[in-house]
Structures are given as structure tokens and as C-alpha cells.
Image (spheres, rainbow, N blue to C red):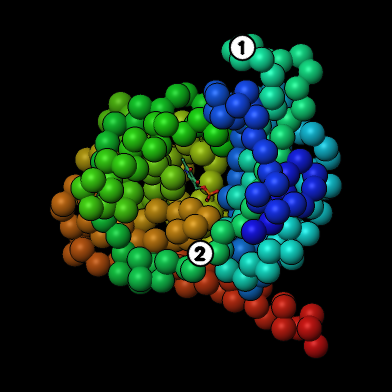
């Protein structure tokens, strides 16, 4: 397996992480996960723009220009031969003697690799169950930081309950999932939490909102309560790896009839069309 290490593509076994790497000690760094379909990255520019924003928000300079990173990632993708899966990228603030404050001269370390992973077709067609749990994370959830313990604990609680996702509740309001954004449909209107400091501004959330706009589905980017979640007509989650996935049961109770709803299905179909476009572009370019 090959990895991108700083700005070189090397064998995984050659990559060395120092014990005093700040990502390892403090979770001091940022990351992205980009989906790959038909060997091509999906919404790569949007993910890289968010990576840049996350780095800026934690006051970390990227070690080299974003355009260079993009080129290296495309080379990595080609070298790995990945057709369907995920491209993971993280940038640590670098290695320095352990001390909370920023080091004065550490070089940020980029690490990226690919992971084969099929589309979650069963979940996408049948829907998944979720639990609700308190949102115990920090107040800058808009930064895609390596510090993921709040999300890890929430996701494990979901797994312990035999569920796919933990829906996070802060002061009675649904913020997002442990690694996904959450939407509900109520009387034909799509609701999702506004993109502020309490949620990650999901790329798939943004794609879903664009699709809803094109399909003329009314949208409210407004907070909704746990009570509204439990009386919703439909519920679904969005993420790079889970796409637009119906949630059919929450805390053991069915969402409406307990089957994926019609607006969720409409959005899923439009999303699939975007994936299919990648394939048709590929077959055109090879002609
Ligand atoms: C907390 C959180 N919210 C939402 C998302 C979904 O974001 P995206 O659609 O960009 O993958 C993620 C993805 O990892 C996440 O960790």
C-alpha cells in the first residue's frame, strides 16, 4: 500500500510517525475524507477548500500550496489503483517537544492514503437505525479537526445499541450525527441545522441542499427539536461515505411507517445521477 507522506508517495512501511507528532499527542491537526467513484474523486475541490478553512481556523499553515496537494492526491489515487472507496488526508501541526502552545518551527505533516470501500447499498435501500445522545463535543464543530473523542464515544454508544448512527442533541436541539449531518421532512419541508459552529458544514449536506433547490423542495435551515425529530415524516443522514441514507428507526421507535420516505428517495435518486455522471464522463474521455 502506498501513502502520501509530506509531499512524497512512499510505501506505508517507510512512513514514520514521531512520538512527539502533535496529531498523535493532542489531536492537533485537520483532516478530510473524499469519496472515490470509478477511480475519480467526488467534489474534491470542495473538500480541499474545507481542509484549507479548517487549517486556517486552527491557525496552521499548510506545508505547501493546495494546488500541489491536489496534484499529489491525484497521483496517489492513480498509484493506488483505487476504483471505489475513500481517500483520507490528514495534516498534523508537526513534531516538536511536547508543550500545549504552538511550536515555533515545526513543519506540518501531510499523510494520505486510500481505502477500498463499496457503496453501502443495503443501508441506502433499506435505511438504518439511530439512537439519540447528548452532544458533548466542543463548540467549534465546524472545524474538521483530528480531535474526535466526542464523536468516537457517541458512535460507540450507537454501535452498543446495534444502531448505525448517534444523533446528537444539544440543549434539546438536534445538531448532527456523530459523523453525518441530519435532515428531517415535515409536511413536505426539509429541515436541517444551520451551518454554524455547532455542526460540520458537510459537503454532502451542501449537495443535498442544492438538489432540493433543483427539485423545488422547500428547505428550512433552522434548528429543530428532539420532539420534532420524533414526529417527523421522514429522516435521513448525509455524509461522504454514507451518501443520503434513510433513518427508519430512532431510539427503537419507527420513523413514521418505518420505511424510507418519498422525498428521501427523490433526493437519493438525484444524488445517484451525479455519481453516474462520473462514469459517463469517464467513458467519453476514453473514447
Ligand atoms: C461530525 C460530522 N458531521 C457531518 C459529516 C458529513 O460531512 P461530509 O458530507 O462532508 O462527509 C461528517 C463527516 O465526516 C462529520 O464527521
Residue 23 sits above or below residue 189 on the image: above
Please report whichever mark, 1 or 2, sits nearer to the chain's N-terminal start.
1
Position in image of residue 11 (x %, y %):
70, 53
Which is closer to the viewer, label 1 or label 2?
1
Q: Are the residues flagged by discs 1 and 2 in contact, CB closer than 8 Å?
A: no
Does residue 182 show up? yes
Q: Closest to the observer: 255 or 55?
A: 55
Furthest toward the bottom, the residue is 287
Residue identified by numbered label 2: 117
For disc 1, the neighbor class at 10 Å (few under 14, some 14 to 19, many from 20) is few
Residue identified by numbered label 1: 99
Position in image of residue 272 (x %, y %):
52, 72
For disc 2, the neighbor class at 10 Å (few under 14, some 14 to 19, many from 20) is some
Does residue 229 show up? no
Q: In percent of the image, x 79 and y 80: which residue is there?
A: 285
Residue 169 sits above or below residue 102 on the image: below
User: For disc 1, does the CB lie below 8 Å from ligand 1?
Assistant: no
Q: In percent of the image, x 15 and y 53: which residue is there?
A: 253
Amino acid at each position: 500500500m502506498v501513502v502520501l507522506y509530506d509531499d512524497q508517495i512512499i510505501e506505508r512501511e517507510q512512513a514514520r510517525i514521531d512520538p512527539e507528532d502533535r496529531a498523535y499527542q493532542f489531536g492537533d491537526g485537520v483532516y478530510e475524507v473524499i469519496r472515490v467513484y470509478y477511480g475519480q474523486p467526488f467534489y474534491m475541490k470542495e473538500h480541499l477548500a474545507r481542509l484549507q478553512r479548517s487549517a486556517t481556523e486552527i491557525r496552521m499553515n499548510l506545508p505547501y500550496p493546495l494546488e500541489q496537494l491536489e496534484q499529489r492526491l491525484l497521483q496517489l489515487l492513480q498509484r493506488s489503483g483505487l476504483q471505489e472507496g475513500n481517500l483520507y488526508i490528514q495534516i498534523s501541526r508537526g513534531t516538536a517537544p511536547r508543550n500545549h502552545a504552538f511550536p515555533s518551527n515545526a513543519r506540518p505533516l501531510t499523510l494520505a492514503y486510500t481505502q477500498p470501500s463499496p457503496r453501502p447499498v443495503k443501508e441506502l435501500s433499506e435505511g438504518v437505525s439511530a439512537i439519540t445522545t447528548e452532544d458533548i463535543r466542543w463548540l467549534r464543530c465546524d472545524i474538521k479537526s483530528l480531535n474526535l473523542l466526542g464523536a468516537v464515544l457517541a458512535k460507540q454508544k450507537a454501535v452498543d445499541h446495534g444502531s448505525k448512527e448517534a444523533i446528537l442533541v444539544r440543549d434539546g436541539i438536534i445538531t448532527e450525527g456523530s459523523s453525518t449531518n441530519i435532515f428531517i421532512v415535515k409536511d413536505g419541508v426539509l429541515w436541517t441545522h444551520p451551518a454554524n459552529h455547532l455542526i460540520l458544514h458537510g459537503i454532502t449536506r451542501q449537495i443535498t441542499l442544492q438538489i432540493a433547490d433543483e427539485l423545488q423542495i422547500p428547505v428550512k435551515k433552522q434548528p429543530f427539536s428532539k420532539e420534532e425529530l420524533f414526529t417527523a415524516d421522514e429522516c435521513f443522514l448525509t455524509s461522504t461515505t454514507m451518501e443520503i441514507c434513510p433513518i427508519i428507526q430512532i431510539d427503537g421507535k419507527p420513523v413514521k411507517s418505518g420505511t424510507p420516505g418519498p422525498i428521501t428517495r427523490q433526493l437519493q435518486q438525484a444524488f445517484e445521477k451525479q455519481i453516474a455522471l462520473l462514469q459517463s464522463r469517464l467513458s467519453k474521455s476514453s473514447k
